[in-house]
Amino acid sequence: MVRILWVDDEIDLLKPHILFLAKKDYEVIPATDGQEALDILEQQLVEIVFLDENMPGLSGLETLNLIKDKYPSLPVIMITKSEEEQIMEQAIGSKISDYLIKPVNPNQILLALKKHLQTKRLVSETSTQNYQQQFREISMRLMDRMDSKEWIDVYKKLVFWELELASSEDESIYEILRQQKDEANTQFCKFYEKFYSNWLIGKEQDKPMLSHTVLKEKLFPILKDDVPTFLIVIDNFRYDQWKAIQPMVEEFYRTEKEDIYYSIIPTTTQYARNAMFSGLMPSEIERKYPSLWVNEDKEGNKNQNEHDLLKENLKRYGLNLKTTYHKVLNAQYGKRMIENLSNMLQNDLNVIVYNFIDMLSHARTENELVRELAEDEKAYRSVTQTWFEHSALKDVLKFLSNKKVNIIITTDHGSVKVDRPIKVKGDKGISTNLRYKVGRLMDYNPKEVFEVKDCAQIFLPKLAITSPFIFARSNDFFAYPNNYNQYVQYYMTTFQHGGISMEEVMIPFISIKPK
């Protein structure tokens, strides 16, 4: 039975309410003043307090402050005859849970109790019921032949339910969702592999926005507005992570447009981000700007020429703009850059790249403590939220929120949690990424991978005549036979990128405007 402490100097007049609540299985403990209420709280456990605002002796607000000092997590609902804004603000500032105006009726009281004591259970039950209704609809769609836009719609629905059910008390329904998402990933990989090369050569009418076309289609048109534009690229940023931080962004901004575009493969910075900035596929970058491309088998930073590639891209489309490029690798640099934001407003386009999430995914692989902090999808999103809340990026957005600017938030690729090892052998020159491999003399089961023998078919630079590319699908990752068990245990359930999955390929491109 739920215990309620009801504090009111006219408690005798509330007997009808108390009897009504008793029939609903609530026990009401009455108190006629603030001091009596504090004494009762010393002796008994209660789940919630109803507190009259206007009482002799200790006032309702004074009693509220004393309760919150000692029992900060105890929900308190203030009940008052006054509609004065000042009293409401004081009560809200003292962290009341709700505010009711007298006279209250029994159903108001009951609704307030359910809202503050049973919300989690009721939301969980409702979400579970709603997903069960949508489960069949999503399953039927997975059996149909879908185009790229329809796949985006399905992925958005799955992410929506992943977020809705993340706090569900019904573990079984979350497991059903996970299985449906695995099935969706299996079907998506087949779809992507079937049409990918045709998208690149323009054979398919259903060609989605891709890494090398997204800036031309979405960014370049707004650069003609004569308004400073900030392109914020969060490396390795997934759509579900965007949905996790979106409420914090929308404290200062409205989301004007939420697009999803498709990353090219490999879904790594070296390939996808260079393609995004250059507006070219990797083999085209190598041919057109050989000094700006560092191949797979060469030493050196593979994405050190992004600004130069962007400037060449703008030049090809006749956009003679003043641009800056900043890569934020640590908090110190992020804070220093904030001091320069006023000067950056003089530029047409400012690109800011944040590497935290990519560093988090690598740290999670290598550090046991970080692995525990981000042990699953929900925790991974939570760490992203915590980072953003205290990040220099949020400070940048705060500063720009009262300026006339265009702001784009996007990424180059996402990541997927891997849990199925696939054996691959190769010589010492084989690439090291867990989600794609390229090299000579590789030995693998062609049925377990997406195999591309002719690199030119998907516009990737050729290392050697006998160097195919292979890509991991869904939740797979590549493992060497040598020290196989140790290798698999080390990388199992880590977040990786480079292959084909909804999480890596379908990524956000968000346009926001200051409110």
Image (cartoon, rainbow, N blue to C red):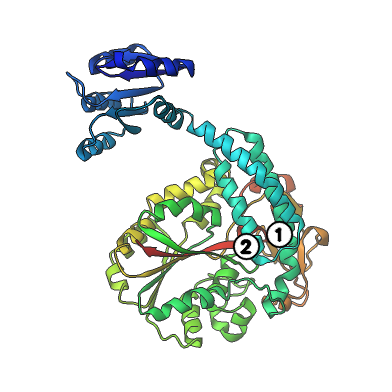
Residue in the foreground of this view, choosing between 129 and 511: 129
Kind of residue at disc 1:
Phe
1 or 2: tag closer to the N-terminus = 1
Residue 264 sits above or below residue 432 on the image: below
Q: Are dots 1 and 2 in contact, CB under 8 Å?
A: yes
Q: Position of residue 185 (x, y in %)?
A: 70, 55
Residue 398 sits above or below residue 75 on the image: below
Q: Quadrant of residue 44?
A: top left
Kind of residue at disc 2:
Val
Q: Quadrant of residue 396?
A: bottom left
User: Nearer the viewer's eye, disc 1 or disc 2?
Assistant: 1
Residue in view at x 59 percent, y 46 percent: 162
Q: Position of residue 120 (x, y in %)?
A: 50, 33
Task: Give the residue pinned by disc 2.
Answer: 505
In this orientation, does residue 109 appear?
A: yes
Residue 271 sits above or below residue 250 on the image: below
Task: Give the residue pinned by disc 1.
Answer: 188
Residue in the foreground of this view, choosing between 137 and 416: 137
Q: Please tell me the numbered disc located at residue 59.
A: none
